[in-house]
Image (cartoon, rainbow, N blue to C red):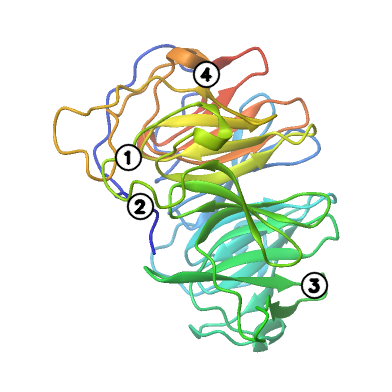
Amino acid sequence: MKPLGFISGACLVAALGLRTTVLAGLYYFPFSVAADSHGNVYVSGKQNKIVKLAPDGTATDYVGSPRGNVKHRDGVGTAALLEDGKDLAIDAADNLYLVDNNKVRKIAPGGVVTTLAGNDRSAFVDGAGTTASFKNPKYIAVGPDARVYVVDRVENEYAVIRIITPGGVVTTRKAADGGPLRINAYGIAIVPDGSIIESDGARCIRRLKADNSLETLAGQCGKHPYNPLYITGDAATSELWTPLDLALTSTGAVYVADLRLNRIISIANGKVATVAGNNKIDMEHSNIGGYSDPGFLDGPAKLALFNSPEGIAFDPSGNLFIADTMNQAIRKLTPAGVVSTFSK
């Protein structure tokens, strides 16, 4: 099913506070971010392209070209065409991976775009390269073994994990009965031991272990399908709203973008804490799905305001970049706890 309370809005708010590197019209609902080993940041969204942001904020069209409804085309840079770019991931060699409609595209350094796996069919079919099919791929991550993990969903029902080898061979993670393992994942991250951290549609964060058991790391899975609460502190008693994208630190902390709560949250050492975001939680009117007032404010992290943060990624210096989707902006959270608008 969808994350409980998942509703995407379309109302933009006026910008407040200081901005840097403001580039009007650069993004159309940025969805995902990834950072390479040189500190460059890559952004995908609904503009049929990936934007590259240099460490100084200079923006260039990296691959793809916004040409309306087009079919995909492999190629180099803006000669390549993207259909419907969603989530991004990056490996240790700075190769990017993009969920693009029903395909997974690989973008090598220099902007060389190839189709790693998938075709125009919407189905669960394992196989090699373009003989494999995806049903409804949404989120993506790269493991320490260089395999690519894809959350492939039957919307409003369940998700399965598809795994792609570096050579493009696609398999599906199996349950004990030999059928596909069904979970309720959205955003995922792969930890060094190969287990999968997943943001669960039941308002929680879980770890999927090698034996297919699920361990709850934060939130109360399914406790409040309506009128959710936000409770920090001990992870065992914490409550979340609409966790989506995940990012891991080198020390094992899990960072979470909570879409409707408009906050960035950390899970570390058995504690859940607000890292950034101070949007007012509105409990005075019907709050069935969870609602916090949208906003746009830079400054100290715990005073900053967001409007539907969807994608997050760390750069090598420990800065967290945030795709602030409905504000059409990329925000930057420094290790010192300051939020700025890196690009808009």
Q: Could you tell me which secondary element the residue under label 1 belongs to?
A: loop
Give the residue number, with chain letter if any, for mark 3.
165
> Residue visible at 45% across and 57% down?
66
Q: Position of residue 80 (x, y in %)?
A: 61, 65
Quadrant assignment, res 320: top right
Q: Nearer the viewer, mark 4 or mark 3?
A: 3
Q: Nearer the viewer, mark 3 or mark 1?
A: 1
The quarter of the picture where the N terminus appears is bottom left
Q: Do the residues labelled 1 and 2 touch (CB within 8 Å)?
A: yes
Say what amino acid the circle numbered 3 marks: Thr
Q: Nearer the viewer, mark 1 or mark 4?
A: 1
Q: Nearer the viewer, mark 3 or mark 2?
A: 2
Which comes sooner in the sequence, label 4 or label 2? 2
Distance (Cα) linking label 1 and label 2: 9 Å
Q: Which of 133 and 292 is in front in this view?
A: 292
Name the side, left or right, on which 4 lies relative to 239: left
> Residue visible at 38% across and 60% down?
2
Distance (Cα) linking label 1 and label 4: 29 Å
Specify whether residue 58 is in view.
no
Distance (Cα) linking label 4 and label 2: 30 Å
Give the residue number, with chain letter if any, for mark 2.
4
Quadrant assignment, res 307: top left
Q: Do the residues labelled 4 and 3 touch (CB within 8 Å)?
A: no
Q: Please, is residue 240 above or below residue 49 in the view?
A: above
Give the residue number, with chain letter if any, for mark 4.
340
Residue 228: assigned label: 1
Q: Are marks 3 and 1 in contact (CB under 8 Å)?
A: no
Crowd class of label 3 (few under 14; some 14 to 19; many from 20; radius 10 Å): some
Name the side, left or right, on which 207 lies relative to 28: right
Distance (Cα) linking label 4 and label 3: 37 Å
**Total labels drawn:** 4
